[in-house]
Amino acid sequence: MRRKGVIFVFIVICLISIALCEEEDEDDPTNPHRDPSKCEVCKYVVTELEGNLLDTSKTHEVFKIGHEFDKEKKEVKYTKSLVRLIEVLEGVCDRIMNYNIHAERESSRRLAKGTSETMQTLKDLRNKGVKVDLGIPDDMWDIPSAPVYKMKQYCDTLIETYEQLIEEWYFDEPSDRKDLTTLLCIDNYLPKGDDECLEEVWTGKEKVNFENNQKEEDEKIEKEKEEKNNSKKGKNKKNSKKEKKKGDQRKDKSKKRKSTEEYKSNPSTEKRKTEL
C-alpha cells in the first residue's frame, strides 16, 4: 500500500512538472519547451543532412544519362549525382520529426532523438499496470511536441533558402569542401556570435540541475520583491520630503500672516500712520 502511494506521488510530481513547463515563458532560456533557436535549427539540419548523405553513400548504383537515341550514354555514380542530392534534401526535414524534447538535458542538447527519461519512466509505470493519465490518448504520447514541429518548419525554410549553396558545396571535390557547419551556419545562416550551441555535445553528463534552477528562480523572485520594496520606500521617502516641504511652506505662510496681523493690530503702528 505504501509503495502504491509513493508511485502515485511520483506520477503527480511528473504531471505537475509537465504542466509547469507548458506554462513557462517560451522565450525563457531555461524552459525546455521553448521555441528552437536559429543555432539549434542549423545545428540539427546539418546533423541530419550529413547523416542522410552518409546513409546514401554506401550504394554502388550507376546512372546512365543521355537522350533516348544516343548510342553512348554518360555514366554517373549515384553518390555523385544530382538525384541523390535532391533525395537527401527532400528527406532532411522529415528526419527532424524524429526528435523529442529531453527536458532533463541542458541547452541545445534538449533536442534529441529517442524517448526522454521522464517519458520513459511514465511508460515503464504504465507497462507495470500503474494508471498514468497525461490528458491525451496513449497512442499520442510519442507525437512530436510543438518546438519540434517549429524546427521542422524552420528547416524547410532554411533548405529552400540555401539550396543553391548546399548544391555547390555538394559538387565540390571532397578535398576542397569546407566544413558544412561552418559554411551553412556560421558563414551564412546565423547572426555573428550566435553559434555557441554548435559546440555542445551530449555525453550523458550534461543534465539540468533542477535544484539549482529552482534556487536561482527563488533568488530572482526575492530580488524582484526587494527592488519593488526599495522602489516603494524611495517613493515614500520622496513623498515624505515633499510633504515636509509643503508643511514648512505652510508654516512660513502662517508665520508671515501672523506677523502681519500683529503688526496691524499694534497701537504704535496706528499712531505712526496718523503722524504720517
Image (cartoon, grey):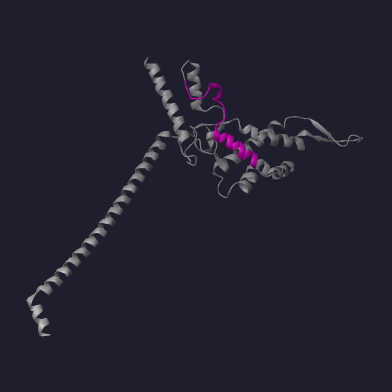
* Residue at image point 36% right, 45% down: 224
In this picture, is 175 found above or below 15? below
Location of the C terminus by quadrant is bottom left
134 part of magenta stretch? yes
Q: Is residue 215 visible?
A: yes
In this picture, is 54 found above or below 264? above
In depth, the one of 253 and 124 nearer the eye is 253
Residue 127 spot, x, y in % from top left:
50, 17
> Looking at the image, which residue sits at the far bottom?
276
Name which quarter of the figure residue 176 lies in.
top right
Left or right relative to 137: residue 45: right
Left or right relative to 249: residue 163: right
Left or right relative to 227: residue 18: right
Residue 23 spot, x, y in % from top left:
46, 35
Residue 192 spot, x, y in % from top left:
57, 50
Residue 253 spot, x, y in % from top left:
20, 67
Q: Is residue 198 visible?
A: no
* Residue at image point 34% right, 42% down: 222
In depth, the one of 266 and 163 nearer the eye is 266
Which segment did they paint magenta? 132-157
